[in-house]
Every structure is written in structure tokens, then in C-alpha cells.
Amino acid sequence: MDASGITDNSSNDVQVGAGSGNSGGIVFDGDAGTVYGNVTLQDDLTIGEGESLNVPEGATLNTGSYSLTVDGGTLTGTGQIIGTVNYAPTITTTGLSGGTVDTAYSQTLTATGDETITWSSSDLPTWLMLNENTGEISGTPATANTYSFTVTAENDYGNDSKEFSITIGTVSVTGVSLNKDSLTLKEGSSDTLTATVTPTNAANQKVTWESSNTSVATVDANGKVSAVSAGTVTITVKTENGSFEDTCSVTVEHGSLTNTSAKAATCTEEGYTGDKVCGICKEVVEKGEIIPANGHTYKDGKCTVCGEVDPDFEEVSDVDDTKLPQNGDNSNMTLWMALLFVSGAGVTAMVIVNRKVAKR
């Protein structure tokens, strides 16, 4: 404590200051002083950091024409102080909260002391600004780090400096979403899912992919889903930071179907509609059905489809073969010829008669 302005008129060795008529003084015990009686300053008195001065009840401290300044120390007591006490700034902010990359940061420093206090700093990080009138520090950090700097609060009676640190962390993940809730693929085809991590400025954008059944569909590190065989599978994406998840239901269908083992039914044999087989995995997707044999369709003693002879067919004739002349038998030949001649002559005669009648 700078007490050079206090006159020592006491015979007491520990009394280094005295009032008029030896009626009082200031007694110091190390950095702590106590005012006894009525004391008038004979020079400026400053109570520095770590020091204290107590003016107890019944004591009086008169500053006179000098200044009493509290600059980091403490002035206590219920006694009377005559004159002006000046207070230098004391920074009361004990620490600064942390911040996040790409997120605006702001905090206001505080200090006690007489107006007007001016704030300053010579080593602020480049992303920070310090308002000299309000003590507000603000800015938007771009990089995660711990930044240390010293600020000073100053007025007409002194100043106070203090070192601070701000720890800037990365942006944490709050969720993830896929661009599709469901997906349908043919065997052998593929499609790529897109995962969006939120917020978009989260530091750790890493995700992992998983298929619930790789025999149905697989997924690679880039979200590419490849269909393997018919079925349903769930594709899950998970964030590395926070383990947030989203899912997509994938249905894998068979590829183009071909009809195999088809066989037409015949008159005597069954047929088959054929099996529907996946052209990619060769799996029989749908079994065929048996077609009953068609049976024969006979006409004139034969099947019109396959030519099979009708075993029940009986041939019918209008002429008695026994009455016709047989080879080598000429006994009735003359008679047949005569009958044919007479029949022809009769027809000719009827034609002539009809013509004569017509002329009349």
C-alpha cells in the first residue's frame, strides 16, 4: 500500500500514520491497514491488488486535497470517509464459455470501477473483435482450437489486465436422413442412396452402411445398393458421431421371366403349360400346369390330327359287289350292253318327239 502521504507522528512503532493532534492514525499489519481515530491524508493513497484498508465504525478518514484510489485492493468498514474515493477498474469476469466452429460467438466482459472504462487487447485471435466501450467480444470461429489472449480494462485511475481462453469445438451431428424411404430393384440391378448428415456444417460427416440380409441386397461404403436375389431387406445408415440412424426398405424382384418346359398336348399324351423361370437367378418363380390329352378327332375312319385309324369304323356301300361282273366272267356282258343300247335309243326318241310338238 502506497501510504507515503500519511504523516507518522506517533510514538507507537506500528502506527505509521496519524491524525491531527495525534488523535489517530493508520496501523498496518502487512498489506492490511486499519484507520484509528481521525486521519487526514498528507499525500495520495493507493490501495493496490492484494491490499486492504479498513475504516471501522467510529473512525474517520479525510482525503483532504489528496486522492484515495482503490486499484485492485479493497476498502472496507462502516467508518466515515470524507472526500472522494476513486476506483480503478477490476475485471470481474472469471472465465469465458466455449464456442462452436461456424457458430457466432459473443460474450461481454465485466469490471468494477469508475466510469468510463475502456477495453483493449493486443493479442486477440483474428476472428474475434473487442468492443472498447462495452467489453463485448464477438466473432465467428472457423477452426476448432483453444485461443488465449489478454484484455485490459482502463479508466482515469488505473487499469486491470486479465488473461482469458476460449475453447472452440466442432459442430456435433444431430441427425441423418436418407433420400428414399423405400426402393424396388430387379435382381442384378443397383441404385445409390444419399445420406444427409445434419447440421450440414457438422465436423464429422462420416457414416456407415449396413444391409440386414446380404443374400438379398448388399450396400457399399458409398450407399450403392446392389440387388442379389428376390426378397425384402433393410438398409441402415448410421453416423459416426452420435450414432444417429435412418433406414430404407428395399424390395428385390426377379428379373424378366421366361417360360420353360412347355409342351403341347397331343391326341394321346398330356401337355404342360411350362414353368416361369427368372432369367437372372434361374429360380422357378411359378410352376406350370398339366394340360389333358386332346383325344382323337375321327373322320372317315381316321384322326384328322394324327392320322390314327378309328378302330370302330365300318365302311358302308350302296352297290352289291356280287351283282357286278367280275374279272374273267363274261356271261352277262352281252345282256348289259343290250340294256345300255335300248336305254340310249329311248332317250333319243323322246327328244325328237318333243321337238315336233314344239314346232306345231
Image: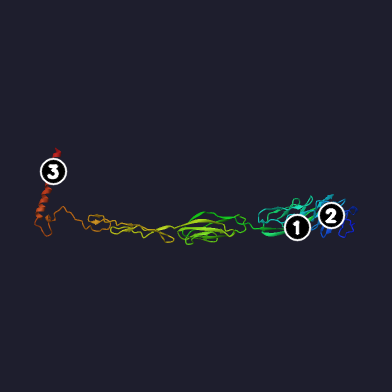
Earlier along the polypeptide chain: callout 2 or callout 3?
2
Which amino acid type corresponds to the residue marked 1 in the rendered image?
Answer: Lys
SS under mark 3: helix
Residue 128 image offset from top left, x and y in percent: 71, 55
Label placed on residue 77: none
In this rendering, does residue 352 appear at all? yes
Residue 327 image offset from top left, x and y in percent: 13, 59
Q: Which residue is labeled 1 in the image?
A: 162
Residue in the picture at 56% in, 58% down: 238
- Density class for disc 3 (Cα within 10 Å; few <14, some 14-19, many ≥20) is few
Q: Quadrant of the N terminus?
A: bottom right
**Eye-nearest disc, 2 or 1:** 2
Earlier along the polypeptide chain: callout 3 or callout 1?
1
Return the residue nearer the eye: 282 or 183.
Answer: 183
Q: CA distance from mark 2 to mark 1?
A: 31 Å
Q: Which residue is labeled 2 in the image?
A: 35
Q: Residue furthest top?
A: 360
In this rendering, does residue 84 appear at all? no
Residue in the picture at 13% in, 44% down: 350
Q: Quadrant of the C terminus?
A: top left
**Eye-nearest disc, 2 or 3:** 2
| Res 154 → quadrant | bottom right
Report the coloring of the rendering. rainbow
Task: Please say if the residues under marks 2 and 3 sit with CB atoms less than 8 Å apart.
Answer: no
SS under mark 1: strand
Q: CA distance from mark 2 to mark 3?
A: 185 Å
SS under mark 2: strand
Q: CA distance from mark 3 to mark 1?
A: 159 Å
Label placed on residue 352: 3
